[in-house]
Image (cartoon, coloured by chain):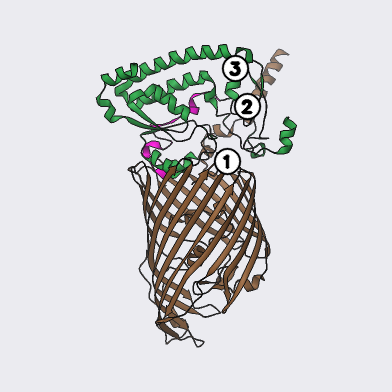
Amino acid sequence: MKKIIYTSALLSTVLLGLDTIAPENRTFEQSKYIPDISLIMDASLVNRDVEDAELGHLEVPGVAHGIMGSHEHGEASHATYDAENGFNLNYAELVLSSSVDPFFTMDGVFHFSPEGVEIEELYFTSTALGYGARLKGGKFNSNFGYINEQHHHSWDFNDMPLVHESFLGMHGINETGIQVQWTAPTETYLMLGLEVLQGENEQMFGNGEIHLSELNEANEDIEAEDAPSMFIVYAKTSFDIGDTTLLGGLSYAQGSSRLDHTEDEEGPHAFSGDSKLYGADLVVKHYFDSYSSLKWQSEFLYREMDGTQYGIKPDGTSAAKDILKEQAGLYTQLIYAPNKTWKMGVRYDTIFQNDVELAGVDLAKPNDLNKYSAMLEYHTSEFARFRLQYNKNDALYEEDEAVSVQTIMLSVNISIGAHGAHSF
Amino acid sequence: MKKYFIVLLFPLSLLAHLNIAVSYPYIGALTKSIGGEHIRTIILAKGEWDPHFIVPRPSLISKVRNADALIMNGGQLEIGWLPPLIKRASNPKTQANAKSFLNLSHHVDMILKPVEVDRAGGDIHPDGNPHFHLDPKNILVLAGVVKEFLISLDSGHSGVYKKNYENFVKDWEQKMVLWSEKMKNKKGLEVIQYHNNLAYFNKAYGLKNIGTIEPLPGIPPSSRHTIELI
């Protein structure tokens, strides 16, 4: 009898023991090496006083066309966020990051949207160079200016500043290349950066061949430029005055431009030349305590695009003319967070210089393009944000007619998984 | 007086002091007590701020960049602000795997480790309550850890660090007697806090936490919960 009890006790221990081997004790178990994972969703309910179909045809005259709303671009269809009236599923952002070895970390940011999956960022970063130097390689958001490096979900408004979206498109400067940054060994924060990028920004830069001969045999192709073709430098500094922090920066980007708009329905053309972009940014943030703050953020952009414009005639032949664009704009926004739950803010956007000279003739493009925004946020925790935003966009034109577009949006941004740390 | 004595003994060492960045003021004070004249502590977070929500101001990047070592609290207390600073500063000496990096939470027993880790329970610390420095007994443990850490970085002054450590322990033990005396009649006292910051303090002196103003960790207070609490 005793023997049976012992045996069964022993047996059950063995069986239970087998059953309860913790996953981390399995011989070839690797789960401890799973990178930090987080998933962010962004969706919205939009009410705009303009039809979706019309929105894609609106342009910022002389600066950009079809930047709001989805529009066909060759074979690819591009959509900005919150483009449709009604519900929008903007994206699911999957972020994976981990140390690689004692010398590098790696980060991957993947955007899943109804249009497909995009590698938003994928880069390695050095950790062991020392002397304040850091090397980053892969695809990443450039550190040009302030807002460009940030992801959509850390912006204070659902849409990009007007001048950024008009000059650089909905992705901003998001390129493949390398970045070297150096932080000076001083008490005051001073950082210098250099980036060499492929240079394929669809709104302003580019280096690919443009096959004008396919439109008409009489045309000559626009030759490709050697890549990488985009170079960026910047300097940033910051200091604190009591509980107020100032962060300022100057940035400069230059590169070749090859813009292929030959398939466009309205005014098909191509541009070939060189472009320069100058930026200045200033952020002033005051902290009342750990939970409440007032943030004033402004950025100025000026660009010069110098080259040849190839207007495409109905028969496909092209007419080359010298073109020079000198354009400038800025945004300035004020955000007040009384506590961790609420946040509110206003933003003013403007493009105030819009000089376009075609074959020596000033095209007299409008130069008071403005946009006004206001928002109110409610946070249930650090991981969930509901935002009500109102926009009045007076920068859009149809043909030569100004169209004022008003939008009201209720958006939700939720994240699960690894704790996203806040950068300044 | 003793401090000046030490300075007189090692005048040259002043030129080669170690820059030690620390996340919170209490770590700075502790490290300074042990390191004395041979180290310079650079405190990243201000004492009056909520330790969970420190603003990663760019000026802190420079501080981490210029540091010879980094001492942090750990237990995920710094998860929301220190990682981007370390990343931006790109200082090999302050990387989490470096010899000159010290995570204090690895050296104390943390209490209130959650049985269930789910954000539905708020923004909880999965490794346990990280506010362990408020138990005076833990400070003694940490002082020993910091002493060993400093010796590993700068063995040339190990004698000084050991001596400072012994003095610190002596002072601290005296104070602990004093505090116990003062807190004697507070045993069993029921307290309400904003966040369970004082768990270790309460445990050390027998106070009873009966509620927090925030309904769950990291969830902002609501009027309903506050009324319930009252």
- Residue A17 circle label: 2
Q: Circle 1 sits on which residue?
A: A291
Label 2: how many Cα within 10 Å (few below 14, some 14–19, many 20+):
few
Q: Is mark 1 on a helix, strand or loop?
A: loop
Query: Looking at the image, which residue is at 53% across and 35% down?
Result: B49
Image location of residue B32, percent across then percent down:
40, 25
Which shade of the palette goes to chain B?
Answer: green
Task: Tell whether label 1 touches label 3 (CB within 8 Å).
Answer: no
The brown one among the chains is A
Label 3: how many Cα within 10 Å (few below 14, some 14–19, many 20+):
many
Q: Confirm whether circles 3 and 1 share one chain.
A: no
Give the quadrant of residue B121: top right
**Amino acid bearing label 3:** Tyr
- Along the viewing direction, whichever of A232 and A221 lies nearer the viewer: A232
Label 1: how many Cα within 10 Å (few below 14, some 14–19, many 20+):
some
- Along the viewing direction, whichever of A261 and B201 lies nearer the viewer: B201
Image location of residue A377, percent across then percent down:
63, 50
Q: What stretch is highlighted in magenta?
A: B87-110
Q: Circle 3 sits on which residue?
A: B205
**Amino acid bearing label 1:** Tyr
Task: Tell whether label 3 touches label 2 (CB within 8 Å).
Answer: no
